[in-house]
Image (tube, helix red, strand yellow):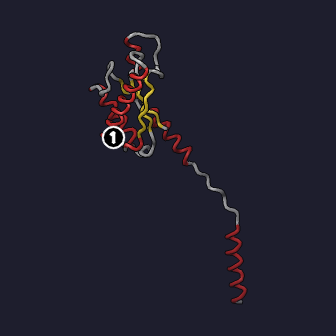
Amino acid sequence: MKKTLIFTAVAALALAGCSKKTPEVDLGNEGMGGIAAQVQSQLQNVYFDFDKYNIRSDMRSVVASNAAVLNQAGAENLAVAVEGNCDAWGSDEYNYALGLRRANSVANALTADGVAAGRLNPVSYGESNPVCTSGGKACDAQNRRVELKVQ
């Protein structure tokens, strides 16, 4: 009787170990994609004065708001491109350098507000990525910006 009971128990364990398991579905990437899209929708552009890369006083609250968004639960590991842009005044070389200064200025401010520096990737597009091409002061002002893009 003991042998039969032991044999039955061993057979049951062996069969249970060989049963088909339902594959686990990893929703991590889809979940992170949803978080990334939500975070991206909350980020705001930072605008600059002509030929300047220091953050204007009226843009400090925008930087602080962006830092809060990037530090919220679920977003704290997302990498972010900090994209510096310029208007068309000046040479291409000058505008690429100015765009990088603007991107670094915002990245430094975000870091001061608690965003891990390793998550931020400053890059410059100079004048090559305009959002307005109709000309004029108001149009140029729209192009003097830093955009944050979740990567």
The type of residue carrying mark 1 is Thr
Foreground of the two, 44 or 135: 135
Q: Quadrant of the N terminus?
A: bottom right
Q: Secondary structure at mark 1?
A: helix
User: Count of labels shown?
Assistant: 1
x and y, in percent, of residue 129 in the image: 47, 22
Q: Which residue is mark 1?
A: 111
Q: Residue furthest left?
A: 57
Which residue is found at the position 68% from the left and 70% from the top? 16
Q: Is residue 79 above or below residue 26?
A: above
x and y, in percent, of residue 11 in the image: 71, 77
Which residue is found at the position 71% from the left and 83% from the top? 7
Relative to 99, is 30 on the left or the right? right
Q: Quadrant of residue 96?
A: top left
x and y, in percent, of residue 112 in the image: 30, 40
Q: Is residue 141 above or below residue 19?
A: above
Relative to 148, is 6 on the left or the right? right
Q: Is residue 65 above or below residue 49?
A: below
Which residue is found at the position 29% from the left and 27% from the top? 54
Relative to 73, is 15 on the left or the right? right
Foreground of the two, 58 or 139: 139
Circle 1: is it few (<14), some (14-19), or many (20+) Cα within 10 Å? some
Which residue is found at the position 54% from the left and 48% from the top? 28
x and y, in percent, of residue 43 in the image: 41, 32
